[in-house]
Image: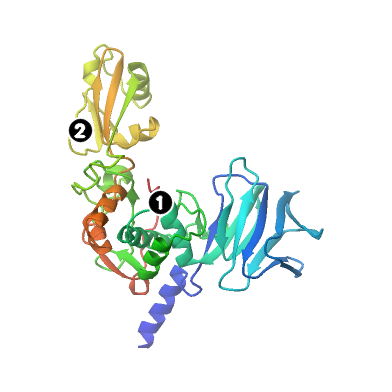
Amino acid sequence: MKIKLSLTILLSFYFGLLSSQIKVRLFTELTPDYAIFTAKSGKYQIRYNTGRSIAIPNGEPILIALYNNRIFAKLRNGASFLTDSVEIKGETPEDFFTLRINESGTKIKTYSGDLKCFSDLETLLLINTCDIEKYIAGVVKAEGGSGRSEEYFKTQAVIARTYTYRYFNKHIIDRYNLCDDTHCQSFSGITGDSLIINAVRSTKDMVITTPDSILIISAFHSNCGGETSPSEYVWVTDQPYLKRIVDPYCLGSRNALWDKKISLTEWTDFLKKNGYSGTLADPSVFNFNQTSRVPDYIVGSFSIPLRTIRTGLNLKSSYFSVNADTDSLLLKGKGYGHGVGLCQEGAMIMSLKGFKYEDIINFYYTGVKIMKIGNTRKSDDDKLTLVNH
């Protein structure tokens, strides 16, 4: 009994469960030098490193700005101070606030919990500490949109929770857990969507694991074009639960098909930069028919990973065929994204056809289990970094 209890405590510590809180860096892709914080609900205090604290009335904006690699804060009532860091701390379960930064066109976003601000490499670092389940609801909204069925939202919630716990310490050296862009998971703050909130609540603590209870890499993408990709085609690493799946559900969706015309010069220049030294006189040598997903584009004795072409030419997917003409090529493609794991548009259709979230997860991830996070085991391989699109 003591051994089992000790193991549970260790696992809880590893996954950050003891506090059920997560630290998320906000506006990661931008370089803010000031932000406007406004408390909207609950009760907040601003604290700084001299040990002082000031109560913040709801609705009163606070300017937080960089100044000589320190933090300058100014309240509407005229109070201001210069400090190394600032923490704005909520004191009730219903605390939430809005945040706007200086970047042109940036929307005001709403967050729950606390905010810590400090200077790092001439950037204002904004770290939101919030409840994990509220964070996951925000991820579902950012990654899955709105107006979907509840079973789809349940699916996306379990996927987001799985990623959260598997990579919980991804940025721990930077003093936070995860960032808010696609390097980790998209997060634009809390959501008031009742369907999403109910979906997260009804799947609370549920994650996806391998048969031996290790959290999976819960990859997903927009549309697979009718066939998902084995993980080794995209990230080299072969995962037994990320296999090729024939998917009939996404074929009528908006991202199922695409095409792009590229000049023959651009195509050959790209291939030459990647080692091609074959003939250029006959454009037909570049023709390529991909009826089922393959890892490489092949011209004569030359081959290049399709993922390299997708990235280098900014294509929607690596699932495409090539038809060459005199001075141009037409790429006829399928799907949108890397193609590994769950196909979002396929999952949406499955949910509308009556499939439960467990059915959808087991369709796209081969041989997995769905269980409570407290029953999972630690993975020894968390090195694979992916972008979920």
Quarter occupied by residue 377? bottom left
* Residue at x 30% of width, y 48% of height: 345
Left or right: 307 as drawn, with respect to 182: left
What kind of residue is marked 2? Answer: Gln
- Label 1, residues with CA under 10 Å away: few <14, some 14-19, many ≥20: few
At x 22%, y 38%, the residue is 294
Amino acid, disc 1 = Gly
Q: In the image shown, does 95 or 323 lie closer to the viewer?
A: 95
Residue at image position (47%, 69%) is: 16
Instruction: Name the residue rendered at 40%, 61% in the picture.
Output: 196
Residue 168: in sight, yes or no?
Answer: no
Structural crowding at the residue carrying mark 2, measured as other residues with C-alpha within 10 Å and reported as few (<14), some (14–19) or many (≥20): some
In which image quadrant can residue 202 be found? Answer: bottom left
| Percent x, y of residue 371 | 30, 70
Of pointers 1 and 2, the one earlier in the residue sequence: 1
> Which quarter shows the C terminus?
top left
| 310 shown above or below 322 | below
Q: Secondary structure at mark 2?
A: loop
Residue at the disc numbered 2? 290
**In this picture, is 12 found above or below 162?**
below
Residue 83 shown left or right of residue 148 in the figure = right
Q: Quadrant of residue 205?
A: bottom left
Q: Residue furthest bottom?
A: 1
Distance from label 1 to label 2 (Cα)? 31 Å
One can see residue 332 in this view: yes
Of the 4 image quadrants, the one containing the N terminus is: bottom left
Residue 380 in the image: state x and y as whole percent. Answer: 36, 62
Q: Position of residue 32 (x, y in %)?
A: 64, 46
Front one among 304 and 58: 58
Q: How many marks?
A: 2
Horizontal side of 336 relative to 36 (left or right) equals left
Q: Which label number is shown at residue 145?
A: 1
